[in-house]
Amino acid sequence: ALGTAQTDIDAIEAAVKGVANAADLLAVSNALTAVQADVKEILAANSVINQDVTINSVATLEYAESLISTKTDAPTVIVNGNVVVTTGAAVFTAAQLERVNLVTGKMATVLKDLTVSNTATPATTTIDFGALTFVDQSVSLTGTTSTPKLKTITTNFSVTVAGAVDYSAVTNIGGTVTIGGADVTSLNLAGVTIGGAINTTGSGAGILVLPIARSIYVG
């Protein structure tokens, strides 16, 4: 793609020198369109991050931003490594949390473990993985986390959050499922294929203790 792009650029330079009429301008326009397509192909080919991504401080946030472009037209990425996101009341400002979400929102695939510990204030702050569809190992979520497109977790899944727990959009969880149950008001895993046992934290396999949940749908 890089060689093709250079060829197209050379063609543009030659065409610009010879512009004499509308037809010549059309030729230049067509060549520019070809270069744009080449650039998009180059960007897509470079959308794999071959390392772990950790965000737990302003410094690590800035480094993550250097790895993953958060521009609107930037491609989503595959992270060939672990992803760890840790927020807290003293770690990030509201504006910095927005930047965290711009980075996490670009992650489409994680090829190792995904671990989120979101204890940021205000409590309504959500860590957003809006593009994430596939995690090739385990997922551990503490605090409010959004994964609207997530379909597959190949091994274990654990989630600890207050309120409604709804992962019915997930297709497959290859391992066990552990729910932090004390503050769960409802649980919805309807239609999810679960390879292992499901339980609440501290309970035996197959045992759910959800004292304030008003509805439970599993499998």
Image (cartoon, rainbow, N blue to C red):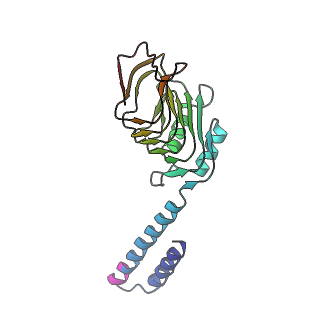
Q: Residue at x 57, y 44 (%)?
A: 112
Main SS, magenta residues: helix
Q: Position of residue 63 (x, y in %)?
A: 64, 46
Give the x, y percent position of residue 54: 62, 41
Q: Position of residue 73 (x, y in %)?
A: 45, 55
Residue drawn at (47%, 65%) of the image: 41
Q: Does residue 134 sit above or below 126 in this rendering?
A: below
Q: Nearer the viewer, residue 119 or 139?
A: 139
- Residue at 35% from the left image edge and 78% from the top image edge: 26
* Magenta highlight range: 20-26
Name which quarter of the figure residue 18 lies in: bottom left
Can see residue 69? no
Residue lying farthest right? Answer: 59
With 63 as the anchor, is 169 left or right in this view? left
Q: Is residue 166 left or right of residue 128?
A: left
- Inspect the magenta stretch and tell me whether residue 23 lies in it: yes
Q: Quadrant of the C terminus?
A: top left
